[in-house]
Amino acid sequence: MVRVDDVAIHGYGGYIPVYRIRAVEIAKVWGTDERELPVEEKTVAGPDEDAATMSVEAARYALRRAGINPKQIGAIHVGSESKPYAVKPTGTIVAEAIGAGPKVSASDLEFACKAGTEALQFVAGLVSSGRIEYGLAIGADTAQGRPGDALEYTAASGAAAFVVGRMDERAVAAMEAWTSYVTDTPDFWRRAHERYPSHTARFTGQPAYFRHIIGAVKQLLDEDGYSLDDVDYVVFHQPNVKFPLAAAKALKIPLEKLKTGLVSGFLGNTYAACSLLGLVRVLDHAKPGERILLASYGSGAGSDAYIFRVLDGIEEKRDKAPRLDALIERKRYVSYATYARFRGKINMG
Amino acid sequence: MRVPRYWRNLPFIYRLSGWRCVECGAFHPVKPIVCSRCRSSEFQEAELPKTGRLIAYTVLKSPPKGYEEQAPYIVGLVELDDGTRLISQIVDVSEDELKEDMRVEAVFRRLRSNDERDVIEYGYKFRPVID
Ligand SMILES: [Zn+2]
């Protein structure tokens, strides 16, 4: 519905921690059948990392690619469900760490795994209305699953950041269109003082993930007159590997278009960063003129769908910061015991 | 309560931003009244380079209070590209992978684990450069 012609991504950055745990290592502890594992391995944040530190890493890469002065950033919005503080916006920490502000608006956004794409809408809106020159949108999470729960195999850590500004010849991708599709669907939630989320296991597929992603994509295509043939890459929220593949199949999208942006098999589900890290990987590979369809999913529930068109600026900016593949290849495996210690699953007393 | 002192040093601790003496070029993390090297009182805001090389290191096995969760960890002497030397924790690497003159870059991390009621202290550490 919102068709925007003058807003573009000027810089992007993806960050994942160095640590990984293999799904078979988790399965060994709980005695799960190895053939049923939803991903191969997932990222694990180090003991000194959280959503704020990973936001800063991703933001620094995004700024390097954008090549702007941090003082030109007028808004920093961070989508996360693992904020370091219950009260104190993560954006304040990011602003100081990158040298932005104090003339900056900053807030934390929440909408489970779509909080990051929500942040992107906010800053794009501020840029489009002329209130700010550039804005920084971030999705970051150190996701946690209850030990032994199915989510423990996938709940991972990562961050993605985007510098958004007006369209010019240096921009890397135009934000051509976006839409949101939201309903009251209780598939997954966490009450205020609970440490781990609860979910209705059977409910997270059909009426939740698929209904909203497919709903958002169809809404975007219908209202903005795009067809799936106009799109070269597709990125869906990826809580595992199976769901995005099934959503693509339901929409008759060839798997070839999904491959580049499908990272959950080796990163896990990085929640608010999840679909955005897929977008980062696509931007690392795409050519000017190609179109990217992105659809996030956040429990509760909703999906934001976007169409991006890659611009000439990508060629010059892509290698001003490490590509996501360099971070994917950089890895150190940890045991379940180390993982539990890192993520505070053991009470040290 | 450690908050005020930590807070005053944030620009340096967060992004190596401080003050350079216009007269002699000495770098000061916090703006002094007069330069400790040349007594001049004119300073310009400046950020140190974020990359450098590892000159020396040691592994801390019994760390001070507040750092237990990260132990054992590596503390190194880093020489930045402009020659400034800093002591810093070295992360994302194990001792057997460390090499003298290894290229390192500044990252933003939690410095110590605090009581749940306290402010979280963040700041720079160094890791091997990612290309
Ligand atoms: Zn001086």
Image (tube, coloured by chain):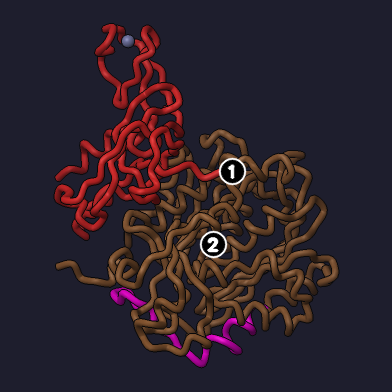
Which residues lie in the magenta part? A191-213
Residue A140 locus on image (x, y percent): 47, 60
Residue A80 lies left or right of residue A339; in this view the side is: right
Label 1 residue SS = loop
Q: Is residue A327 above or below residue B35?
A: below
Is residue A338 at least partly visible in the picture? yes
Ligand 1's quadrant is: top left
Instruction: Say which label, 2 or 1, has the lower sequence index.
Output: 2
Q: Is residue B69 above or below residue A73?
A: below
**Which quadrant would the N terminus of chain B be assigned to in this image?**
top left
Foreground of the two, B117 or A234: A234
Residue A106 lies left or right of residue A163; in this view the side is: left
Residue A209 locus on image (x, y percent): 59, 81
Identity of the amino acid at label 1? Ala
Q: Residue at x 22, y 60 (%)?
A: B116
Residue A250 lies left or right of residue B99; in this view the side is: right
Q: Which chain is red?
A: B
Name the chain letter of the residue that bears numbered label 2.
A
Please tell me if label 2 and label 1 are on a single chain. Answer: yes
Q: Which chain is brown?
A: A
Q: Quadrant of residue A48?
A: bottom left
Residue A229 lies left or right of residue A114; in this view the side is: right
Question: What residue is disc 2 on?
Answer: A116
Identity of the amino acid at label 2? Gly
Q: Residue at x 41, y 58 (%)?
A: A51
